[in-house]
Image: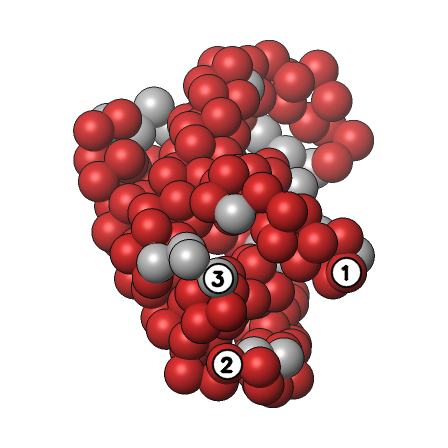
């Protein structure tokens, strides 16, 4: 996949960067950890500019996020409640569980959207619950742009500094991703444990 990603970017320039980042948001297996540092490297060997690559990457990322936000709007809380009403007993879920989760996202969702833009895999998926909770679109857009701009700029500048050695960042980002995934897994495990424990007490 790395060869395909880099060849598209070399061939299409800014459009390739834009396309890959939009696709990366919708199809997370395409990692921005490859797209962004390589985009930075391209600015040292082609006529692409650092600012241009940052803008193309950020616009592409935001477009992908908006698409997933729209999907979340289609799968709103009311739709989930209907599904839970029908299949909830098999999953030991109730409408109240969905309502509590939605209330939590309404309270903490803004910061979650911003922070998750710098978390592998989650940065793409977070747009869906944001849409489902009917988050204010202007705020969603602002926080998405802010978080995405920071992440994109950081990795692109690293690619610029590393130059031909831009692949050196991949091993570090793999470690970063692994640590994040472990933390997410542990967090989910704790939540599931507490949920089951509370159910048994009830």
Residue at x 78% of width, y 31% of height: 90
Q: Tell me the number on the disc at residue 46.
A: 3
Q: Tell me the number on the disc at residue 153.
A: none
Q: Quadrant of the N terminus?
A: bottom right
> Which mark is first along the chain, 2 or 1?
1
Position of 23 compared to 109: left or right?
Answer: right
Q: Is residue 198 above or below residue 182?
A: above
Q: Nearer the viewer, mark 3 or mark 1?
A: 3
Q: Secondary structure at mark 2?
A: helix
Residue ID for mark 1: 3
Position of 152 compared to 126: left or right?
Answer: left
40 or 194, which lies in front? 40
Residue at x 20% of width, y 29% of height: 138
Q: CA distance from mark 1 to mark 2?
A: 17 Å
46 or 197, which lies in front? 46
Q: CA distance from mark 3 to mark 1?
A: 18 Å
Q: Secondary structure at mark 3?
A: loop
Q: Is residue 40 above or below residue 108?
A: below
> Which mark is first along the chain, 3 or 2?
3
Q: Position of residue 102 (x, y in %)?
A: 40, 34
Residue ID for mark 2: 163
Residue at x 65% of width, y 18% of height: 83
Figure quadrant of residue 196 = bottom right
114 or 63, which lies in front? 63
Q: Position of residue 150 (x, y in %)?
A: 30, 62
Residue at x 42% of width, y 76% of height: 160
């Amino acid at each position: 996949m790395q060869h395909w990603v880099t060849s598209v970017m070399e061939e299409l320039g800014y459009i390739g960067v834009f396309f890959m980042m939009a696709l990366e948001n919708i199809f997370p297996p395409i990692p921005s950890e490859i797209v962004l540092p390589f985009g930075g490297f391209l600015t040292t060997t082609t006529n692409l500019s650092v600012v241009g690559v940052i803008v193309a990457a950020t616009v592409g990322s935001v477009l992908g996020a908006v698409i997933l936000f729209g999907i979340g709007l289609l799968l709103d809380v009311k739709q989930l409640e209907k599904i839970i009403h029908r299949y909830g007993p098999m999953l030991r879920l109730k409408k109240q569980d969905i309502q509590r989760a939605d209330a939590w996202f309404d309270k903490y969702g803004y910061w979650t959207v911003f922070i998750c833009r710098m978390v592998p895999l989650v940065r793409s998926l977070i747009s869906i619950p944001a849409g489902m909770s009917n988050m204010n679109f202007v705020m969603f857009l602002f926080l998405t742009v802010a978080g995405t701009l920071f992440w994109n700029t950081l990795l692109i500048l690293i690619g610029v500094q590393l130059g031909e050695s831009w692949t050196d960042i991949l091993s570090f980002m793999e470690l970063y991703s692994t640590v994040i995934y472990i933390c997410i897994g542990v967090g989910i495990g704790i939540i599931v444990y507490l949920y089951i424990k509370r159910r048994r007490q009830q």
